[in-house]
Structure formats: structure tokens, C-alpha cells
Amino acid sequence: MKRFFSLAMTFIAAVSVMCSCTQTEIVEKKQAGIQLYSARQAYSDIEATLAKVAESGYTAVETLGGPTCFGLEAADFKALCDKYGLRIASTHAVVPYNPADLEGNMADWRKLFEGLQTMGAKYCVIPGMSFGSTLAEMEACCAFINQVGVVAKEYGLMFGYHNHKGDFNQIEGQTILDFVIAHTDADKFFIELDVCKTNMGDVDPMHYLKTYGDRIKVLHAKDEGVLGSSGDVDFKQVFETFYANGAIDCFVEYELPFEIGEDAAANERNLAAMWQGIADCNKFLQESDFVRSCEY
């Protein structure tokens, strides 16, 4: 009887430990988001794509466009994301700037913001645009962007901009991105800094994190391949400085360039590699002790 009791207690203790470990894993899993552009080659079946994104460990998405997404109305796209436990935290979208029709521009921005409000988004990010070819044109564009930022707030959104390599070019001796930051208001327009060399050129992302830390509210975690694979980006320093500046949210963007063609076997191999890379990027976030859980 004593032996039975001892074995029973050992079994209960083992089960308790197993349950405790499972609970710890659930608690410690970091909330992580991904820009859906990462899986653009799989857009033909958007539901299957969202299911696979969730399976890869992500809990939020940064979508593209609006007020409709992938041919779906805002409420329908939200329902599809909800089905797979994915929060729509942000979008990449732009209404082309037309100084000759600012009223029409603003009306289109409102339509976009209405859709994002329905989706429950937190951010609306311009994924790149031409601010003008002269400083005067850029200053006028920035003034309008501030107005759009005010309207975004009406819909509970934060309005921002995602950099690309061309944003570090100069116009009349002024670096474009620096000029835009200087001529927009921090409470109306933020920067989503993409730290990948492809989008930074030869500019050190740390310069912007240290110089404009109060403006960089969102991070695009991107590398030339899986996060951390190129050695070009010191992600530990990037994340630690980003957090020290008071920001928390980031999105993975993984880019494996290929086109879906007529070779079924090649398509299968490429898509498998794409999904593996997407999963490995999330693994990098989960296993890096310097990365925190997002708060979308």
C-alpha cells in the first residue's frame, strides 16, 4: 500500500510539473506580428495564408490596403483574422497626395480610416511616397500630413510612415526623411523604422533610433533573410534602444523573392522555403532574450 501511495504521489508530482511547464510556455510566449507582404506569393488563398501565419506563431498582422483588404470588406476581413486568432494591428496604405484636391484626398483618407476602425487597427502606415521634388513642395505635403494625422486620431488611429532607401536621398541639401520628421508633429505622425540594409542603404539605423527616438513608435524587424542571418543588423542594440525610447510594437517582414509560375514542383519548394523563413523569424523573436512581447 505504501509503495502504491508513493508511486501515485510521484505520478501526481510529474503531472503537476508538466502542467506547470505548459502554463509557463503559454505565459511566456511573446505576442508577435508580421507584415502580410511577407507571404505575398500565397495571396491566391488568403484564408489559408492567415491560417499558416497563425500556425507560424504570430498573433497579429499588419495588412495592406484598405478600406477593403484582399477583396474583402473590412468587417469580413476582420472576421477571417479573428477566426485564426490574429489581431489586425496595422496596415500599409496610402492615398496619393494631390495638392490640387486636398478635400478629395482627405475624404479618401477618412474612408480608409473608417475601414481600419472597423478592423480594430491601432496604426495606419504609409509604405512610401513622394513628398515632393523641392523643399517648398515637401513642406506643403508635410503640412497636409499633419492634418491627416489629426483626422486619424478621430478614428483612434496613430498615423505613420515606413522608410525605404530613397528616403535617405537629399533634396536641396536636405535628407528627405529628416526633413519630413522636422516638418511634421510628433503627436500626429510617427516613423515605423525598417532597419534592413535594403531599406536603410548605408545609413545606420542606430543613428535614427538615437536621434529621433521619440518619433520611432514602431519597428520593422527585417533582415536580408531570416532575422539575424546577415549580420548586417545588430538586433540586440536595435531592440534595446527602441525599448529605451519608450516604444514596444514591431512587425516582422520577411522577403524571399520569387514568382509563382507554371512549375508546380518549384512553386511547392519556394512556398515551403517562404513559410519556413517566416516561422524562423518568429523563432528568432521568441528565443531572443532582448525581444519583448508586443502590446498591440
Image (cartoon, rainbow, N blue to C red):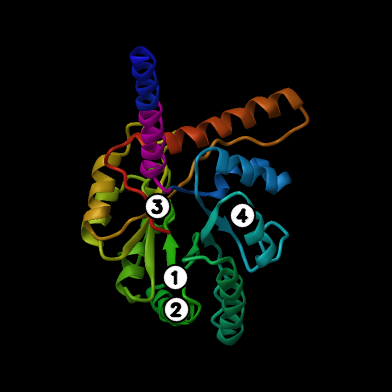
Question: Which residue does the image show at 26% across and 65% down from the upper left?
Answer: 214
- Residue 31, above or below 67: above
Q: Is residue 6 visible?
A: yes
Give the alpha-carbon distance from disc 4 to disc 2, as whole Å.
24 Å
Marks 3 and 2, Cα distance to the nearest angstrom?
20 Å
Crowd class of label 1 (few under 14; some 14 to 19; many from 20; radius 10 Å):
many
Residue underneath mark 1? 159
Q: Disc 3 on helix, strand or loop?
A: strand
According to the picture, the residue beneath numbered tag 4 turns out to be: 81
* Residue indicated by mark 3: 250
Q: Say what amino acid the circle numbered 3 marks.
A: Cys
Residue 285 in view here: no
**In the rendered image, which residue does mark 2 sit on?**
153
What's the magenta region?
A: 15-31
Q: Residue at horizontal 31%, vertical 39%?
A: 233
Name the quarter where the N terminus is drawn: top left
Looking at the picture, which amino acid does disc 1 mark?
Phe
- Secondary structure, mark 2, is helix
Nearer the observer, 212 or 46: 46
